[in-house]
Amino acid sequence: AWCDEQLKANKLKRGKKTAQASQLSADIDTFSAEIADMGATIDKLVNQQADLTKAMQEATAQREAEHAENTATIADAAAGIEAVQRAIVVLKEFYSSQSSSLLQQVPEMAAYKGMQSSKGGVIGMLEVIETDFSRLKADTEAGEKAAAEEYEGFMEDAKGSKLKKHEAEVQLRLDKDQAEFERGQTKKDLRATEEELARANKYFEYLKPNCLEVHVNWEERVARRKEEIEALKQAYAILDQKSVG
């Protein structure tokens, strides 16, 4: 009875520990796969953040250079406009004074406007130049405004994307640390389970000669005993027959 109880309990324990060890090994493999995936994703997020940082730096450098160029162009155009306007005023005053003096000397020249005409001559040319400067200033100001808005939009999107990727990276690192901790604990559980399984197997090796093999020998002895009894019966029968004869 004791052998049967021990063998049954040992068999159950060995089966249980074997199943537990298999499950723990599978859990460790799962943790390892998840940790590897998270590590790869973290590396990807880090690279993407680096790319965004580089893109923002390049965009900022380009915007600063563009802004400096536009600012200089606008300033030059404004200065050109101012200079042309001053020149036009001076020339108009000059032509006006010259016209008055000429009329005093030659009244027939009253209808002649010469180089002061707004549609031709030096003043006309200066007015065209003033228009060109004004157009350049307006176009550059509009381009500067559009470029600044585009830059601000890009920077806002890039910063938002980078922040989300950083937050995802931080969370993944926390999850990865937790998974690595749980994998470590699972490995400890597996070692403990394997030690218990080893002890159960060792105990089974102890039980085999004391229970299983002894049990087989006892059956053999019973069978031999029966054979001996049968042989004795046959011997007695033979002796009885001889006595009767």
Image (cartoon, rainbow, N blue to C red):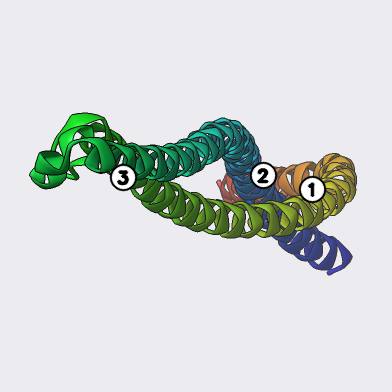
Q: Position of residue 206 (x, y in %)?
A: 89, 42
**Which picture quadrant has residue 199?**
top right
Q: CA distance from mark 1 to mark 3?
A: 99 Å
User: Which residue is disc 1 drawn over?
Assistant: 180
Helix, strand or loop at label 3? It is helix
- Camera-side mark, 1 or 3: 3
Task: Describe the element under mark 2 as helix, strand or loop.
Answer: helix
- Name the residue located 73 percent from the left edge and 57 percent from the top edge: 175
Q: Nearer the viewer, residue 120 or 110?
A: 110
Residue 35 circle label: 2
| Residue 169, horizontal then vertical, whole percent | 68, 51
Q: Closer to us: mark 2 or mark 3?
A: 3
Three-letter amino acid code at disc 3?
Answer: Ser
Marked residue nearer the N-terminal end (2 or 3): 2
Query: Camera-side residue: 240 or 92?
Result: 92
Residue 194, horizontal then vertical, whole percent: 82, 44
- Crowding at dot 2, Cα within 10 Å, few <14 / some 14-19 / many 20+, comes out as many
Give the residue type at disc 1: Glu
CB-based contact (under 8 Å), mark 2 and mark 3: no
